[in-house]
Amino acid sequence: MDKIVIAGGKKLSGTVQISGAKNAALPMMAATILASGQSTLHNVPHLKDVSTFSDVLRVLGARVKREEHGLTIDTSSIEHFEAPYELVRTMRASIYVLGPLLARFGQARVSLPGGCAWGPRPVNLHLKAMEELGAQVEIQHGYIVAHSEKLSGAVIDFDVSSVGATANTMMAACLASGTTVIRNAAREPEIEALGAMLTSMGASISGVGTGTVEIRGVEGLHEVQERVIPDRIEAGTYMVATAITGGEVTLKGVRVDHMGAVIAKLEEAGIVIRQEGENLVVERTSSLAPLDITTAPYPGFPTDMQAQIMILLSLARGTSVITENIFPDRFTHVPEIRRMGANVKLDANVAVITGVKELSGAPVMASDLRASAALILGGLVAKGETEVLRIYHIDRGYERIGEKLRRLGAEIHRVRE
């Protein structure tokens, strides 16, 4: 098993290219199931989750070919409708095949998903939506088993805004008869990207990016070429890395319009951020100010940046507060950053962070994807050496993070234990 070893204290400087967004690429890969033919996705990151989802598509019978940052998916040969436990257990996003399989083939058997170790993220919203579209859905021996002769449009009200359930419902509704209305739909950029792809395939969708999405079912969709949007969470992570180390870094290929909440909070903390075309220049010129942050669905502050911003606030002057409203128990990184000297107190879904003068290098263990990123960030600024264990999580969501950080001047290496 690999670990990442970091010698802290190096200022970051230079330029980093932001990769395509995993959270956009995965539902887009699933959407290719809706049309028989060969579709191509561009700007697809090299990540473990992308490889796993490619294997899921291959098990279904699709032909998947990887070339540089392009992914060609031929779905004309799909003849199986089961996403097996062996693959799905490693990645919750595998449930994205449920809606497309039901819509195109009228049947699906998908293992209940796995993924990050923290917190319940139930699939009930996905199942509720499929049932309201007319599917018969059962849980049998750890599998979601669904059937439908023909899905029918419906009005679907989500109790909570869910990116995954919104995406699955949009895909299923594209080939349903009649009109589907999704209320309290997710507004994230990844949903907008999926909506743009489905529209390019011939779907009739309006309201994407708002709380109400309307899909008018069509008889069929066609293959497409589409580009994956930049990863706003990767961009935010490198912005925090620059801020805590006191350097100056240019982020290339950023969608600034997707970064509003993160940019606003970093500027409030005293970070200088300026836009130069499609690039963002991030610079730390003063000490870090404390913040009050509440995670919220887009366009609010993203829960996927909560762990990373906590590292920054651990070094701010004064006391900060983070309220985690999306996944209230998403604090598995806290005991580990305490090992590095951070002063964090937890009370239910609220973290109170009192800034310290410095962090100390220590052996720490990652528990999920974003916790991995936070511990690496801590290692960049900590005094001495930090070892981050169980770093297979980082391979799920950050493309070549060690290589990118080394190019910016970090002393970071991946070694086999």
Image (cartoon, rainbow, N blue to C red):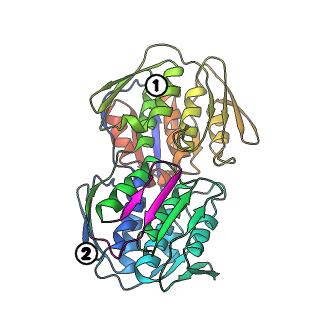
- Taking 81 as reference, is 209 above or below it? above
Secondary structure of residue under mark 1? helix
**Kind of element beneath mark 2:** loop
Is 123 drawn above or below residue 211 in the view shown? below
- Image point (41%, 70%), residue name: 217
Report the span colored magenta.
203-222
Magenta stretch: helix, strand or loop mostly: loop
Q: Can residue 91 be seen in this view?
A: no
Q: Which amino acid does label 2 sit on?
A: Gly
Closer to the observer: label 1 or label 2? 2
Q: Which of 83 and 156 is in front in this view?
A: 156
Q: Residue at x 43, y 73 (%)?
A: 100
Q: Nearer the viewer, residue 259 or 361?
A: 259
Q: Alpha-carbon distance for marks 1 and 2?
A: 46 Å
Q: Can residue 169 be seen in this view?
A: yes
Specify the quadrant of the image occupied by residue 66. Answer: bottom left
Residue that mark 2 sits on: 37
Residue at x-position 59% and y-position 72%? 132
Q: Position of residue 320 (x, y in %)?
A: 66, 25
- In this picture, is 218 found above or below 349? below
Do the numbered discs 1 and 2 sit on residues whose CB atoms are within 8 Å?
no
Q: Name the residue under label 1.
A: 243
Residue at the right extreme, as displayed: 347
